[in-house]
Image (cartoon, rainbow, N blue to C red):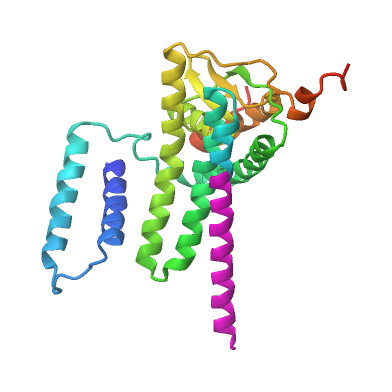
Amino acid sequence: MVYGLGLTAVLVVLWLVLSGSYTLSGDHSILLVMTVVSLAATVGLAVRMRILDRETVPLAPLLPLLTYWSWLGREIVAANIAVIRLIMKPDVDIEPRLVRVPVDLRSGLARCVFANSITLTPGTVTVDIENDGFLVHALDNSFTAPEGFAEMALRTDVASDGKREEA
Amino acid sequence: MNWVEIGQNLLFALSVGSLTLGLMLVLAGAIGVIRMPDFYTRLHAAGVTDTLGAELIIFGLILQSGDWQTMAKLALVGLLLFLTSPTATHAVANAAHRAGQKPDLAHFRPKHPRELQDPEAKA
């Protein structure tokens, strides 16, 4: 129910931003009617298909995910500079590596965010996803520090599933 | 020139700077795609283009656009790129891995033309 309402709210805002017409009295009053019809159809279908859950409507972890993105943005800028230095050097001098990153995350959402973050950071690409780890290809062995991956994993975990209780 | 105009000019300068930087990053990514030795390393070079390069260009366009609706649409395009480009990169890399493409893990360091020209100098 909460997820349905959340999805409806997001879709209403999206529709209004993209169409830019809010009134029934204007030239395009049909637009607003169509808004209601299409939104009802979309949300109704999603509810009937039972695909509304924490993962498809990530409203609860939205704020932590935004703070995580701002951290990720800084990482991406730093990694971009490092990669550009490597590829623009007069003598290309790289040592590619294929490493297995151990992953201990609590939900599928966290795994997805972590794999995407690795790929989004230039210099590292998630090649394969296994049960307990990711296969990661790195452009140079300076990108494969385990501490870097561990910090990113911890941050994704906290951002998508809340604070981890100390065991 | 009053403060409003100064602010507008500053925004314009920021937008032009961001667009220029984005274009340079895209160019660097393209050069990297040409220079890198094998498939996977080329993928990394292309990653520069579709993360920071594309986002900087979109940021510059947002500052240029003027009305809020265009801004919002451009921001949505940026968000879409931010979410889909790693997915596409992963799909390509995973497809290559499954098809049996082996990454070249040797230390890649081609000889400089100078070293090739006179082999006596090193020996």
Q: Is residue B19 magenta?
A: yes
Q: Residue at x 68, y 23 (%)?
A: A146
Does residue A118 show up?
A: no
Could you say which is closer to the camera, residue B107 or residue A23?
B107
Residue A53 vs B49, above or below: the answer is above
Q: Is residue A24 left or right of residue A127?
A: left
Does residue B2 show up?
A: yes
Q: Is residue A136 magenta?
A: no
Could you say which is closer to the camera, residue A87 or residue B89?
A87
Q: Where, quadrant-wise, is the N terminus of chain A in this rendering?
A: top left
Q: Residue at x 59, y 16 (%)?
A: B104
Q: Is residue A141 left or right of residue A121?
A: right
Residue A70 vs B70, above or below: the answer is above
- The image shows residue A148 at horizontal and vertical percentages of 67, 30
Q: Is residue B103 left or right of residue A23?
A: right
Could you say which is closer to the camera, residue B116 or residue A132?
B116
Q: Is residue A23 left or right of residue B34?
A: left
- The image shows residue B78 at horizontal and vertical percentages of 43, 50
Furthest-top residue in this view: B100
Residue B10 vs B55, above or below: the answer is below
Residue A2 vs B20, above or below: the answer is above
Q: Residue at x 38, y 70 (%)?
A: B67
Q: Residue at x 53, y 53 (%)?
A: B56
Q: Examine the image and state in which quarter residue B69 appears.
A: bottom left
- The image shows residue A109 at horizontal and vertical percentages of 44, 30
Q: Examine the image and state in which quarter residue A104 appears.
A: top right
Could you say which is closer to the camera, residue B64 or residue A146?
B64
**Magenta portion: prevailing SS class:** helix
- The image shows residue A68 at horizontal and vertical percentages of 56, 42
- Region rendered in magenta: B1-27
Q: Where, quadrant-wise, is the C terminus of chain A in this rendering?
A: top right
Count the numbered circles shown: 0
